[in-house]
Image (tube, rainbow, N blue to C red):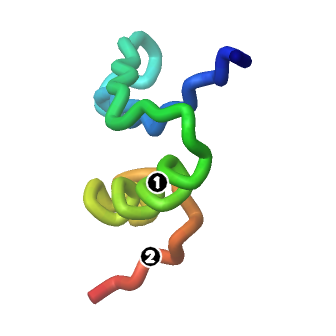
Amino acid sequence: MKDRKRKVIYKITYPKEDRNNFCIRKEILMESAENKEINENESKFILLFESNNPAIGYNKWPKFKNT
């Protein structure tokens, strides 16, 4: 049986107050061997954390809707 690579959805955070010297935190939100499962959930996490909001994150998809 072929060992399938695990895929992850992760969130990276860092304090923007001090960009000269900072620590990055990488938090694994989900792990799966199934592309379909990862693809279905990635946009949900982006929307949940507003990572597509230019004031918060850098994701360009799904497009941010300022309400």
Q: Is residue 64 above or below residue 17?
A: below
Q: CA distance from mark 2 to mark 1?
A: 15 Å
Report the residue at 72% width, 18% height from top: 2
Q: For mark 1, what is the residue?
A: 42
Instruction: Tell me the SS state at disc 1.
Output: helix
Task: State the residue in front, 26 or 28.
Answer: 28
Depth check, mark 2 against mark 1: the one in front is 1
Other-residue count near label 2 (Cα within 10 Å), few / some / many at <14 / 14–19 / ≥20: some
Other-residue count near label 1 (Cα within 10 Å), few / some / many at <14 / 14–19 / ≥20: some
| Residue type beneath disc 2 | Phe
Residue 14 in which image quadrant:
top left
Report the residue at 40% width, 84% height from top: 65
Q: Position of residue 16 (x, y in %)?
A: 35, 33
Q: Is residue 66 above or below residue 23?
A: below
The answer to whether residue 17 is visible is yes
Q: Quadrant of the C terminus?
A: bottom left
Q: Position of residue 8 (x, y in %)?
A: 49, 32
Report the residue at 39% width, 22% height from top: 26
Left or right position of 61 against 45: right
Instruction: Tell me the SS state at disc 2.
Output: loop
- Residue furthest right in the image: 2
Left or right position of 3 against 16: right
For the residues labelled 2 and 1, say whether their Cβ atoms are less than 8 Å apart. Answer: no
Task: State the residue in front, 66 or 20.
Answer: 66
- Residue furthest bottom in the image: 67
Q: For mark 2, what is the residue?
A: 64
Q: Is residue 25 above or below residue 47?
A: above
Left or right position of 58 against 47: right
| Residue type beneath disc 1 | Glu
Q: Is residue 58 above or below residue 24?
A: below
